[in-house]
Amino acid sequence: MTTTTTAPRGTEPTGSATPAGRWLEDWRPEDEGFWRRTGARVARRNLLVSVLSEHIGFSVWSLWSVFVLFLTPAYGISADPKHAAAEKFLLTTLPTALGAGVRLPYTFAVTKFGGRNWTIVSASLLLIPTIAAAFLFKPGVSYGTLLVLAALAGVGGGNFASSMTNINSFYPQRLKGRALGLNAGGGNLGVAVVQVVGLAVLATAGKGHPRVLLGIYIPLIVLAALAATLWMDNIAHVRNEKRAMRDACHDPHTWIISLLYIGTFGSFIGFGFAFGQVLQGQFGSHFLTAGKVDPVKIAYLTFLGPLVGSLIRPLGGWLADHIGGARTAVWSFAAMAVFAALVLVASREKSLPLFYVGFIALFVLSGIGNGATYKMIPAIFRAKSHAAGRSDGAAQGGAEAEPDVAERESRRLANAVIGIAGAIGAFGGVLVNIAFRQAFLSNGSGDAAYIAFIAYYLGCVALTWTVYLRASPRRLPGV
């Protein structure tokens, strides 16, 4: 049974572990006195648990980026190398697609049920794909069953959207870049960590026992749900934000940010899922053991990209806090175009060292761009809400709208946009895997995909500069 704790205005939550069903009725992060006394402590506690849950969600979402390296015809995969590569890319595309699809309802769920309550549910849902795979993922399984199991892992992709929406409401504007960067970066680390854990398990237990990985993550899922139950809070005013998603969909900035997020997060998650397969397909001769491509040798290299891309993401938020999200994003996209061109050259010259350096740089830059883009979301809608408040005040004879009203409006729209952009950005990962699949089917390499990535990054540079950096009367300050 859910209980409600009502705190009169002017009082603060205690910051201690909250009782079951606790709702924070009074939450004013922009009030520096409130924040200094207890707000920071409560927000930090919720952030830590949120990072844990989101991290495990990303790991479950990324399970098949590890599993596909070890699939052979015994697991229903084609014996023809070209068709086997296409089948494996499909196995990493499906969880990416489902993860993108569930992000919108996961965002709604925070406002419907509360951030703490939904974190408990979303963490528990991760048991479905892991337990199913523990029973069914074994030699002799059909390729159709593999597709279903891979798709189920997509539920892990939704945790990001609900987690970011929830944490966005806990922090003041001046700290959102760092907080959202830490939350997202800690979650994104799940992509790298599951690859490291998978490498350790498969190198010790052997290539024939990938399910040992599931035995590690199932208890961690239970731990995450328990931590959310004991130490997280719901914020009352985040509930039932009527028409927020509809209003956000009518705002052109929602779709601009979504396009930029395809280039940042879409690149990160798409590369994270596909990197091992790309190395296997283009440089398999560098990873031979007894005349056969050794997936363990490939796994030694694949985890570094997602690792550095995740660790660097808070830097993107920090840079956005200090020099602006739009400026940080522009430089990130420009550099991504340069290093994507380097990867293309390395691919054509068949240079593994140059190829690897270029790809690691893409992970790093996509991480910085991730942090910057998410900082831009609350900044854009805060600037718009305050500008609208000033306009209303002028229309009413000079009295500005109440700042609290503008803050609530900006938070309402920003939370909705986080969900929309997160979903569309994750579909960017689907597009990355589809681009690689088609490129390898057509030419046996990823060259055509790299050219498409270069064009997209340059387009993002032009779009960000035109809308958010070019001198214009309509330019939003502080973005």
Image: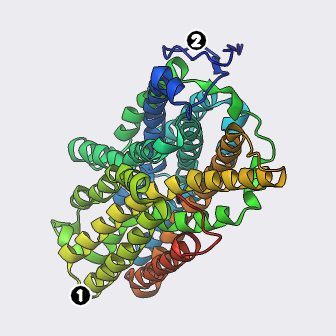
Indicate the amino acid at tag 1: Glu
Q: For this rendering, which residue is in front, 328 or 287?
A: 328
Task: Inspect this view and state whether residue 99 appears.
Answer: no
The circle drawn on residue 349 is: 1
Position of residue 133 measured from the top left corner of the image (x, y, whole percent): 49, 42
Quickly name the residue at label 2: 19
Indicate the amino acid at tag 2: Pro
Quarter-of-image position of residue 88: bottom left
Q: Secondary structure at mark 2?
A: loop
Q: Residues within 10 Å of mark 2 (few under 14, many from 20)?
A: some
Position of residue 466 measured from the top left corner of the image (x, y, whole percent): 56, 77
Q: For this rendering, which residue is in front, 307 or 166?
A: 166
Position of residue 2 measured from the top left corner of the image (x, y, whole percent): 71, 16
Colouring mode (rainbow / by chain / secondary structure / one colour): rainbow
Rendered view: 238 above or below 91:
above
Q: Residues within 10 Å of mark 1 (few under 14, many from 20)?
A: few
Q: Earlier in the sequence, mark 1 or mark 2?
A: 2
- Residue shown at 47%/20% (left/top)? 37
Quarter occupied by the N terminus? top right
Position of residue 143 measured from the top left corner of the image (x, y, whole percent): 52, 59
Q: Secondary structure at mark 1?
A: helix
- Residue shown at 61%/61% (left/top)? 424
